[in-house]
Image (cartoon, rainbow, N blue to C red):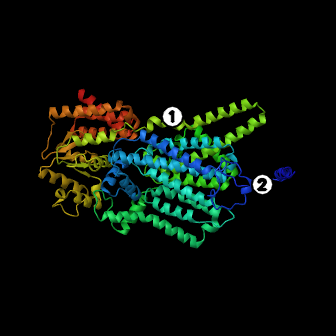
Amino acid sequence: MRRISERTKNLNRVQSGPVRTRMPVSGKATSPANTNIKSPRGIKPGTKVSSDTGFKWNSWLLGVLIFAFFLLIYWRTCCPTVFWWDSAEFVTAVATLGIPHPPSFPLYILLGKLFSFLPFFSLSFKLNFLSGVFAALSLSLFVFLLLKLFRTFFSELTGDTKIFYIVLIMTLFVAGLNFAFWIQGIRAEVYSLNGLVFILLFYCGLNHLAGEKNRPKNLRWLYLFFFIFGLGMGNHNVTLLSTLPAFIYLFVSYDSSDFLKPKNLGAFLIFFLLGCSIYLYLPFRAINSPALNWGNPASLEKVVTAALALKSVKQIGLTLDYTLMERIKDAWIMIYSQFTFLPFLFSLTGFFFLLRKHFKLFIFFLLLILGNSATIIVLPSEFISTSLDFQGYILPVIFSFATMFGVGILFLLKSINEWIVRSNFSSGFNKSLKIVFSIFFFSISLLPFLTFYRLADLSKNDLAYRYGKSVLSQLNRDAIVIIDNPNLYFILSALRYGEGYRKDIAVLDRGLLRAEWNCQQERRNYPELFSDLPSGLMGEDMFLSLMTKGLSRNFPVYMEYTERDSELVNFLTPAGHLFRFAKRISTKLSPELLKNQRDFENSFYSQREDKIFQRDVDALRMFVYITYRWGLYYEQRGMFKDALRNFSSALELDPLNPELQVRVETLKNRIQLAKN
């Protein structure tokens, strides 16, 4: 009778109303006996782990597996050597423990230097692979973020634990295998580290908000948030700053009483400044004069200028006209293209659900997306939708849409399940329908991978490396090379400092010679070359002085030909990608030299048939750039057929370029008139 009465009491309790229970991420309630246990956060250490409360161990195992899985993908598709632009510059910066362009990225440089001590692989590959480590870590932590987010806000969608974990994996596929995220994890860049910092910030903020309501708030997660935010400012600060309004809104809207207390704000500032102390790296390294010492930030004023990239900010020109509207359109086309149609549509479904159920959280994600997308709409002086750096700027947007993809899929699966239950199908048919829809949604999550695999696979892309080696291999020993192309300057520096190739050559950037810090840097790097030159010499005067001094000391001197070098054209002879400077005017090139140069150019043209070349946007731009400058040289020399050949080759890859169109048409008419 006692047992029967106990069962009756429990039955009456259930019928009279629901028992208030804590809801773990699985969506299954813990037993009523545990409802009086007070735990500030997470699962109490003494709680027995069962199928209902086994969240912690399951999530850790899933996190490790996700890290290993994505690290394998990024390793498999990683660029094997030097890559274009900033990737090459970072190789030089890590090799020399130097200071790259603002905001100088001290966090990335220090972590890269630590990783460079691994005793295997080249430095270039190690830094490329390090980006994959950051990317895999961010996705692994993204698992914990999603679990915490759904546990806190979307427990009604997570009733079926198996389905929930499958949707988590689908969400990770969408987040980690779109082009914008993928390409940052396979080349030496700061953006995958920025993605990791963003996920850490979101995770800290969410853990703070997920505290128990009946206990005083512990601010340790907010202290950690602001410390990581300050530390992240030592990487790519523009991206992080674009997310700050959204995070401030999140904290104020859910926890304004604690967040806005003056005492707490002061503590947050202290932790933020403590993180920003990573910038002390700049003056300490600057006074030691590394081989790469951009801006020479040895003083507090220069450190602030470098950290905030103030010179770049001054160049921002925002005009509310057609150009801005075009930028907004192009930016959103770029964001949409990362997911393809169906995943993007399901992300919008998630936003719709969020708008209905959690308006404050909807505003947070909206502010996050608008603020982050503004970095590619407002800040750049020129909008280039194919720029790999632009793709890296929008990683917070990528994570936001991926999260909403997961919400949208869970919402649709729940709605489908409710429809199946209402339809009174047989149990076997119900199960079959669930399997069909699950397979359909899982296949949708693979669309970014199937779309971008070939484009993101850099495992055989050594084009930048071959280009740099091709330039250096043509040069005589102890040559002086003056480049007017930062991309090539970075590549040659990476080969010399990072790979130890042709360290006998002095490489200088003509454009950077206009900066005092660069002249000081090169004076220290090449004291023999700069000896006896006036200390205040800069710019074109420095360029001409270096050329003439090199010749007077019988050093081989090479340069890139530009539009402003028409007066020097008869002093220059082609030498592969570059032109050699001579002491005397040469009005006519020797037949042997011309034959060798034309053979070299023809072998260079053959790259157009390479599929890897065709998929590499930066390689295509460099091809147009190189052939255009060859064309300029031949045109100034009066060698119109050679000029037309090069301009036509450039026009094939850049058919909408109006300047190339005019030059090709003009040369065709000139050659036709000469025949007549």
According to the picture, the residue beneath numbered tag 2 turns out to be: 19
Image location of residue 101, percent across then percent down: 36, 56
**Residue ID at (63%, 43%):** 164
**Residue ID at (62%, 50%):** 55
Q: Nearer the viewer, mark 2 or mark 1?
A: 2
Looking at the image, residue 475 sits to the left or right of residue 183; the answer is left
> Which picture quadrant has residue 615?
top left
Which residue, as the protein is rendered here, is positioned at the far front?
A: 1
According to the picture, the residue beneath numbered tag 1 turns out to be: 450
Lower position in the chain sequence, tag 2 or tag 1: 2
**Residue ID at (52%, 44%):** 66
Looking at the picture, does residue 391 appear above or below residue 537? above
Q: Inspect the image, locate mark 1, and give the three-letter code of the amino acid beneath it.
A: Leu
Looking at the picture, does residue 28 appear above or below residue 274? above
Report how far apart the C-alphas of labels 2 and 1 lie in the structure. Answer: 47 Å
Viewer-proximal residue among 292 and 77: 77
Looking at the image, residue 517 sits to the left or right of residue 28; the answer is left
Quadrant the C terminus occupies: top left
